[in-house]
Image: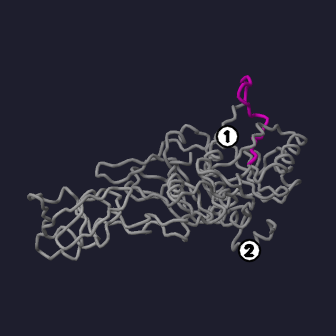
Amino acid sequence: MKSIEQIAAELQGYDPQALSATAVNEFLSRLVTPVTDTEELGIFEALDRVLAQDVISPVSVPPHDNSAMDGYAFDGSQLRTGETLTLTPIGTALAGKAWQGTVGAGQCVRIMTGAIMPTGLDTVVPQEFVKAEGDAITLPAGLLQPGDNRRLLGEDVMAGQPALQKGERLTPAALGLAASLGIKTVQVMRRLKVAYFSTGDEILSLGEAPREGAVYDSNRYTVFGLLTRLGCEVIDFGVVRDEPALLEAAFRRAAAEADAIITSGGVSVGEADFTKTMMKQLGDVAFWRIAMRPGRPMAVGRIGKSVLFGLPGNPVAVMVTFLAFVRPALLQIMGSSGKAPPLLRARSAEAIRKKPGRTEYQRGTVSYGADGSLQVRTTGNQGSGVLSSMVQANGLIVLHHGQGNVTAGDEVDVMMFDGVI
């Protein structure tokens, strides 16, 4: 396990007082290591968990060539360019059992969707495209190619091949795929344990009476929601006052119980509190000033075997730093092999002021413009304490490190919230 100092030495241009967003993610990718413990779960319990091993398909899907349409199955070699084709149905193939019989030239079989293709037949014409003429049907010219509307054995998944791979998160679609193979249980990485607490004498817990200069803790609830959406087991330590003994007890207990520790508040440069001192005293920790807005101050490191993420105190800054840095790192610890979702491109509906040399994450709302293209506009006040802006937004406008002012109509990147917040 490499120390903070060793990781820093590996990164070209590492400057803890002016760290780019890209450098933060690169640093964190070297700091964290995946858990190794696994457990076996039923399909209904495995949603969003990370696969601990490949799922090898015991069967082929589909298990036989079958029809993709309700229609008529026939030998496609009879098709002739520019000519109609007349066929005589001699039976009906239903889903769930094979049709028994022999089909000769000029003959076909009425077939239902999902039914096994009769021997020697490889093409299906949808029933709505044929013309009935007595006991025969006629196919229009130029409608089909041999093999149309036939699903091939194993075209989805072939027996003996990986259907799902280690490191994949089990989405609803993945659960359905596993079930389609007759698989009842899967081996997954154990659930990640994450301890969280807010720090500061000015922070009120819900139920406490208001007092001058104090604010109710919102970070505890947003972080809880973000961690729960990620599938983590959250260990809630509540609010910890700025007292050395209380902070030490909280950090020691968190390090003993959790894979990761997240705090909010107490990491700004020059703050007169005990949080930073206690982090340094108990662990191997770096304190950063990140070239970003909102956010900037952040602490990372280890206390015991737990990875530490010390986030700023402002509510929006907590959520932004979590989405940009903490979430990808936690996914890596969970054993996920998935890459970050692609950023959406949308036209800015307004001019946005931006200084090169830092990454800005502005709250935005993506919608369709009059011409049908995607557009995005900010939610207005971008202060890091304006939590209502995160409720109004459906994504973050990501203005990259080297980017300058944005003119109305320019395309910008957006990190969408759907499924995350």
Are the two marked residues, 1 and 2, in contact with CB atoms closer than 8 angstroms? no
Classify 10 Å Cα crowding around label 2: few (below 14), some (14-19), many (20 and above). Answer: few
Local secondary structure at mark 2 = helix
Local secondary structure at mark 1 = helix
Q: Which mark is residue 121?
A: none
Q: Nearer the viewer, residue 302 or 271?
A: 302
| Residue on which disc 1 sits | 219
Position of residue 232 measured from the top left corner of the image (x, y, whole percent) = 68, 48
Position of residue 16 measured from the top left corner of the image (x, y, whole percent) = 73, 63
Residue 273, quarter of the rendered image: top right
Amino acid at dot 2 = Glu
Q: Is residue 189 left or right of residue 248?
A: left
| Residue on which disc 2 sits | 10
Specify which label sits upstream in the sequence, 1 or 2.
2
Q: Is residue 155 left or right of residue 269?
A: left
Residue under the point 79% across and 71% down: 6
| Residue interval drawn in magenta | 194-213
Task: Name the chief secondary structure element in magenta.
Answer: loop
Amino acid at dot 1 = Asn
Is residue 204 highlighted in magenta?
yes
